Image (cartoon, helix red, strand yellow):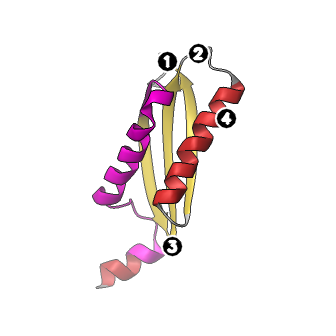
């Protein structure tokens, strides 16, 4: 009981079930980018924070990147309430940076 109370007050990783849903949302839109990595999640109070990197073709335009990240963020917001999503874009070949 104390753990549940403290988890709400302290930042904690999202549950495995929630992370599986996040991965499913990302993979559902996987045709728009080459891959994803460095998924990090946390919950602070009633707010979820999702952070991950996507890899894209290096010649993807800024407009295309804006559309891709906007689509992913919208899909996350539809799946989860009270969520902040941060997506970092890497050109293919820079996944380890």
| Residue 10 rendering spot, x and y as whole percentages | 46, 71
The label shown at residue 11 is none
Q: Give the range drawn in magenta.
A: 7-36
* 95 inside magenta stretch: no
Chain-order first, disc 4 or disc 1 = 4
Q: At numbered mark 3, what does the secondary structure look like: helix, strand or loop?
A: loop
Task: Give the spatial CA distance, label 3 vs label 1.
Answer: 35 Å
Residue at the spot 68% in from the left edge and 21% down from the top edge = 61
The residue that mark 3 highlights is: 46
- The overriding secondary structure of the stretch rendered in magenta is helix
Q: Label 4 vs label 1: CA separation?
A: 17 Å
Check disc 2: other Cα within 10 Å, few if <14, some if 14-19, many if 20+. Answer: few
**Residue at 49% across / 20% down in the picture?**
94
Check disc 1 and report the residue beneath it.
Answer: 92
Image quarter hosting the N terminus? bottom left
Q: Earlier in the sequence, mark 2 or mark 1?
A: 2
Name the mark nearer the viewer: 3 or 4.
4
Disc number at residue 66?
4
């Amino acid at each position: 009981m104390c753990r549940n109370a403290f988890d709400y007050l302290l930042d904690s990783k999202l549950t495995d079930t929630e992370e599986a849903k996040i991965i499913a949302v990302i993979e559902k839109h996987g045709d728009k980018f080459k891959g994803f990595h460095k998924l990090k999640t946390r919950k602070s109070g009633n707010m979820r924070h999702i952070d991950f990197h996507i890899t894209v073709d290096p010649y993807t335009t800024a407009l295309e990147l804006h559309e891709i990240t906007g689509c992913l963020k919208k899909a996350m917001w539809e799946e989860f309430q009270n969520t902040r999503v941060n997506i970092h874009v890497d050109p293919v070949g820079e996944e380890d940076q």
